[in-house]
Image (cartoon, rainbow, N blue to C red):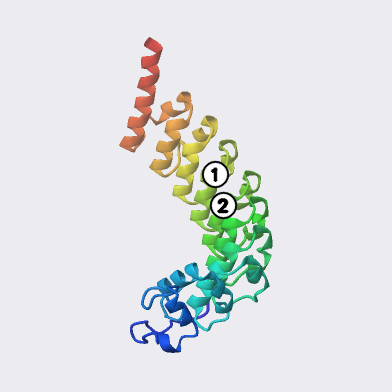
């Protein structure tokens, strides 16, 4: 990631309206010193200026201050963004990636900045997200797991990062969760146990993690959970007995 280039503080470098190339706008009320100003090193002032005067955005795309370029990229015409070369600053590239049509993002699929790639992952058509399934950064893969079509999700069931696998476990259809029942991480297995089909949940009734057993006991068939009535964990025993008592109560009604 390139080193962030912080511009001088607007407090330490006062704006000189007399030497400003846009000083004619002051008399017309299109800028306000200290509030709406393109040449101030203040993102707030720059953004207010370009919202009011978007015709200056294109010229600002070549400015030496990264924040001015990034804000200009929000307001410049789309055809100008399409034609501009890749900016050296990741914040500018993020803005461009957020504005380009989704079918024009190929050049940003493997950007060096993960937040640029996350922006792409949030915008690409779901059927094209397979290009980012193996991204080096888990946060990018997380975004992919949230939007990937169900048919492709099994490809991420064994991702190296547990947060990605947890997201996969939250989205896979219940009938497809058996492949994750032996996940190395208990938090993943807890999600799986809470969403599996009843017969599949029974396979987790003897999990080493008591919260996994508790989740499984809430969903497995009654005939399978009876063996946990004497489980070592009080919460598991209580949940099993409650389900059994509820069943017996219904039978006697």
The residue shown at (59%, 77%) is 87
Res 236 → quadrant: top left
Numbered circles on residues, count = 2
The residue shown at (56%, 72%) is 55
Which mark is on residue 193? none
Q: In this view of the protein, which residue sits in the foreground, 53 or 131?
A: 53
Residue 159 visible from this viewpoint: no
Are there few (<14), some (14-19), or many (20+) residues within 10 Å of tag 2? many
Residue found at the far top of this picture: 253
Q: In the visual, does 190 lie left or right of 178?
A: left
Q: In this view of the protein, which residue sits in the foreground, 233 or 156?
A: 156
* SS for dot 1: helix
The residue shown at (38%, 22%) is 244
- Measured in 3D between alpha carbons, the distance from the residue under mark 1 to the one under mark 2, in whole angstroms, is 8 Å
Q: Position of residue 132 (x, y in %)?
A: 63, 60
Q: In the visual, does 29 lie left or right of 119?
A: left
Task: Determine contact: label 1, label 2, CB under 8 Å.
Answer: yes
The vertical placement of 35 against 106, above or below, is below
Q: Quadrant of the C terminus?
A: top left
Q: Which residue is mark 1?
A: 171
The vertical placement of 130 against 115, above or below, is above
Residue 185 visible from this viewpoint: yes
The vertical placement of 235 against 223, above or below, is below
Q: Position of residue 171 (x, y in %)?
A: 54, 44
Q: Position of residue 115 (x, y in %)?
A: 53, 66
Are there few (<14), some (14-19), or many (20+) residues within 10 Å of tag 1? some
Res 229 → quadrant: top left
Q: In this view of the protein, which residue sits in the foreground, 71 or 234?
A: 71
Which mark is on residue 145? 2
Q: Position of residue 214 (x, y in %)?
A: 40, 37
The residue shown at (41%, 71%) is 44
* SS for dot 2: helix
């Amino acid at each position: 990631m390139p080193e962030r280039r912080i511009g001088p503080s607007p407090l330490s470098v006062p704006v000189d309206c007399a030497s400003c190339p846009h000083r004619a706008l002051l008399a017309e009320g299109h800028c306000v010193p200290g509030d709406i100003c393109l040449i101030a090193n203040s993102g707030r002032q720059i953004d207010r200026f370009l919202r009011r005067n978007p015709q200056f955005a294109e010229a600002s795309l070549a400015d030496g201050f990264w924040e001015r370029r990034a804000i200009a990229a929000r307001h410049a015409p789309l055809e100008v963004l399409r034609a501009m070369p890749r900016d050296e600053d990741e914040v500018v590239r993020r803005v461009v990636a957020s504005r380009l049509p989704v079918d024009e993002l190929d050049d940003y699929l493997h950007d060096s900045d993960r937040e640029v790639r996350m922006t792409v992952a949030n915008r690409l058509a779901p059927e094209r997200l397979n290009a980012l399934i193996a991204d080096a950064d888990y946060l990018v893969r997380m975004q992919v797991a949230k939007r990937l079509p169900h048919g492709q999700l099994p490809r991420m069931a064994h991702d190296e990062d547990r947060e990605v696998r947890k997201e996969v476990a939250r989205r896979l259809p219940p009938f497809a969760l058996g492949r994750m029942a032996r996940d190395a991480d208990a938090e993943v297995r807890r999600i799986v146990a809470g969403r599996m089909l009843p017969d599949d949940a029974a396979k987790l009734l003897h999990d080493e993690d008591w919260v996994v057993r508790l989740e499984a006991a809430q969903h497995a068939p009654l005939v399978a959970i009876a063996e946990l009535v004497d489980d070592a964990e009080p919460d598991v025993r209580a949940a099993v007995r409650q389900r059994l008592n509820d069943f017996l109560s219904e039978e006697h009604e």
